[in-house]
Each structure stands twice: as structure tokens, then as C-alpha cells.
Image (spheres, coloured by chain):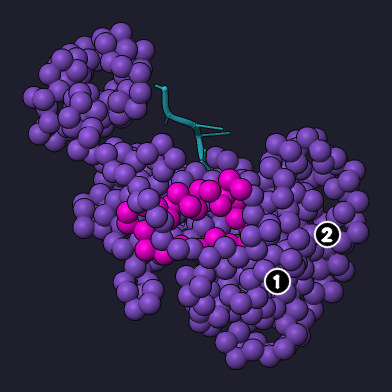
Chain colours: A purple, B cyan
Amino acid sequence: MKKLKITGKELRAIGYPEGPVVSLAINIAKKFFKHNTREQALKILKDVLDKPQAFLEDERLAPVALQLKPAAKTELYETSLNNQGVPFNIFGAEFIEEGATSQMYTAAKLPVAVIGALMPDAHHGYGLPIGGVLATANEVIPYGVGVDIGCRMCLSVFNIDPKALKEKENYFAREIIENTKFGSGAQLDKAADHAVMENKAFYEHGLLRSLHTKAWKQLGTSGSGNHFVEFGEVIIEEDDEILGIPKGKYTGLLSHSGSRGLGASIAGHYTKLAMQKRRLPAEARNLAWLSLDEQEGQEYWIAMNLAGEYASACHHIIHEKIARQLGERPVKMVENHHNFAWKEKFENRDVIVHRKGATPAGKDVLGIIPGSMTANGYIVKGKGNEASVNSASHGAGRKMSRTKAMETISHSELKEALHKSGVKLLGAGLDEAPFAYKDIDAVMRAQNNLVDIVGSFKPKIVKMDGAAPGTKA
DNA sequence: ATGTCC
């Protein structure tokens, strides 16, 4: 069935005001008016504009009617922030820009906030800052999780002498190139398969059903931005009971990516719903929440968890393909989400903990904190410190904005840094150059009360979205 | 982060 596409121009022509109601009406027309003609749809939307009160109970058009209904009703939906925010500790405050801190102060003033924390790699984001941790009572904030739901790390440790990475560099490079796909709309040439695609949520949940085909095409891909797949040298200096592999040097395969278009669509859909439902002051608008006692909140929770499983599947597909090619089974895998929300306990109270660019660091929980394309990443073990709501940073954090990095960093400068570190770069944007990131070791020192380092990962062969250095895009 | 949603 062909979808009916009404344009903003047409809506404004019949008298619709500028603002979010336009895109809302477009989406509703697309969803519900596929059996109507354009003229019929516009007629109905005009009726809603003229008499919004008559459509407040209409199951399809109520959201539009609510937006169009003047005065009194908006007040009903206005929610104010608390004067005094809940407390939150800041780790590595000297590394954190003002914008991120002030976003955290705003988040702490939400009436649903319980406790927060700000990680040493924090920077400004939409809604909650990247590196922000926020616990709520029983509410979920779509932009407290972020657009890339389930963005995560996955490390496979192989019992292969890492000297092989230099000696057979081209062989390992080819494994990455042949088994990964980067880029914004990237799809595999031959679609992958995974049990997650049979998850009943994909069939029972309206929004997820509409995203199933696209998700399947993108399964096993890595996306763009700071996402990567790389081989490196894993060094375990001391035996650790939790990590459970003997000290020594290993070959590691490390990946960083999320839930691709699937998670982005879920985040966009539910944050819009939340913003319609709860109008917050301008500085907090993107922090609109859904209660888990509401239908929409439950739906988001199901969708978020599916996106998390899907992101995990994308990593596993890559790792399994490469492991099979190497003819090896990993002796250990370490993995964690760092954009997600969890049901956890804080001071014995049930809370929803949002980590947007933060690594779970409960007692003895293993995780990965990556550095940059040349700097070490670390295998960490959480200390279960409630001062950070059981969290740690998810990386070194950017020192330079993407724009500034593109303007100031040269190809030759990057080439020299790669050469010095002995890293073979198979592709990346200049904005991912190591100089764009903070010093990971300084960031780790700022959180030594939050995690123990149990191993390190030194990148050797790195693939990100973009052309290889010295080649044309 | 996402083939960027007015």
C-alpha cells in the first residue's frame, strides 16, 4: 500500500501554524490515511484545525488536536523543574567543558531525578550530556539514553601472539576489510542473519514492525562517526580472577558500534512522543520522559531493549565471521553497552539508571573503555562505587569538536602520528585523529575510584568510516 | 549517532 505524503506546504496553505504540529500531522496522515485521497486527508486535517475540541478523544487525531487547541490545555501539560537539583558528583571536572556541566545541572532539576553523576569524558549533547548518568524513579528519558541506543563495545581475546599483527599485517587487515561495512546507510552485500531478527517484539510492536526490513539489511554493519573495528595487542599484566585468563600478551579484536537506523528511529519516535506529552522549560525540553506506568513508556522500554540486543548481534556477527576466518575461538569476550538504561538499585531503592556515554561499573563488572586510534583502550573492572552510580567514562572524550578537528588537523600530521604508534589505518575521517581526543591515561586517573584496570588494548590495525589516509575519498 | 523530517 502506498503511503500518503502530505507536505508542510499543503498544511500551511490550509492554515496550519508553523511548529511541531506540522510534522505531527504529516506523520499521522502517513500512518492512518493510506486509504484516503489527498483531498480527503486535507479535509479531515482542516476540520481538526477548525474544531480541535471535537477531536480530543479521536484515537488517531487527538495528538494533532491537542497541539492545535489553544490556551488552557498547554498549561495542563506544562511541567516545571525543581529549584534545587538532586546531587551529582563530577569526576575529572578539570577536563569537562562548561556546556556539559550545565546540562547536567538542568537534568538534576527534573522532578523525576533521583541521583546523577558526570564522567571525566563528558561533553555537550542533546538533552543529557554525553558522559552523563541519571537515575530516575520509574521514568525513562529517551534522550537520556541517546540516539544510538545500545551503542557498545565488544572485545574478543584470541590466544595468538600479537607479533603476528605486524608480521601478517595484510592478512589481518584483509579480515577486517572483508568482514565489515561502514557508512551512514551501510548494508551488507549479502544480508546477515541472527536470532534477534525473530524476536517477537519485531512482530508485535507497531513501530518495530515497520523497522524490521531496514534493520535486517543493516545487521552486521558498523555505521559511521567514532565507530570502529580494530585488531590490537592485549596485555594482561596480572592474573585477575574475574577476567579469568592468565597474564600475558594476546591478539584482540575490538569493535565499537550501536543499533544503526533501528535505534535512531526508536529514539526519534519516542522522544517526540515524550515531548508532546510533557512540555518542559526550554533548557530541559529534550529531557522529556515517559513513565514506565504508561503505555508509551512500556513500548519504549521494549524497543530500547530490542535495539540493545540488535546492537549486540551486529558486533557478534562481525566477531564470529573473523574468528572463523582466523580458525580460532576467543579465550575471552568482554562487552558492554554504554548508551542504555537499566533497572538497578541505588541505596536499596529501585531506580532506572540512564547511562549516555558511560560504562557500567558495578562491583566486579567488566567493561571496555577505548582510547583513540593510536592510544590504549582499557579492560576495566567496576568497583561498585555509588558515588558515580556504578558508572565510569566510555572513552577519553573529545578535546576538539569535529568541525575544529577537520579545520586544524592535516593528513601529514595524522600520518606521522600513525607511523610513530605503529598503527595501520584502513580508513577514517580526520575528525577521528588522535589529537581530537583527551589523554586517556589522565581520564583513567580521574576515575581510579570507579574502576580497576585489568588489561590494556593497543590498537594496531584500525578501520573506521572513511577513506584510507593518502587516498581519495 | 542517523541516508539528517519541514
Residue A307 percent coordinates (x, y): 42, 55
| Amino acid type of the residue that numbered disc 1 sits on in the rendered structure | Arg
Quadrant assignment for the N terminus of chain A: top left
Residues shaded magenta? A98-124
Please give the residue where the numbered disc 1 appears in the rendered image: A445
Q: In the depicted view, which residue is nearer to us: A187 or B4? A: B4
Residue A47 percent coordinates (x, y): 14, 16
- Compared across the picture, whether A432 is left or right of A138 comes to right
Q: CA distance from mark 1 to mark 2?
A: 25 Å
Task: Check the image and report above or below for A237 versus A73.
Answer: below
Element type at mark 2: loop
| Amino acid type of the residue that numbered disc 2 sits on in the rendered structure | Val
Task: Identify the residue at horizontal 26%, vertical 58% (top origin).
Answer: A292
Q: Chain of mark 1?
A: A
Residue A370 percent coordinates (x, y): 67, 63
Please give the residue where the numbered disc 2 appears in the rendered image: A423
Task: Identify the residue at horizontal 31%, vertical 39% (top origin).
Answer: A279
State which quadrant residue A138 falls in.
bottom left
Element type at mark 1: helix
Task: Check the image and report above or below for A79 versus A397.
Answer: above
Crowd around label 2: few <14 · some 14–19 · many ≥20 (10 Å): many
Task: Identify the residue at horizontal 61%, vertical 77% (top origin).
Answer: A449
- Compared across the picture, whether A368 is left or right of A170 comes to left
Task: Check the image and report above or below for A421 versus A202.
Answer: below
- Compared across the picture, whether A377 is left or right of A69 comes to right
Quadrant assignment for the C terminus of chain A: top right
Tell me which label, 1 or 2, sits earlier in the chain: 2
Q: In the depicted view, which residue is nearer to us: A103 or A428? A: A103
Q: Chain of mark 2?
A: A
Residue A5 percent coordinates (x, y): 33, 21
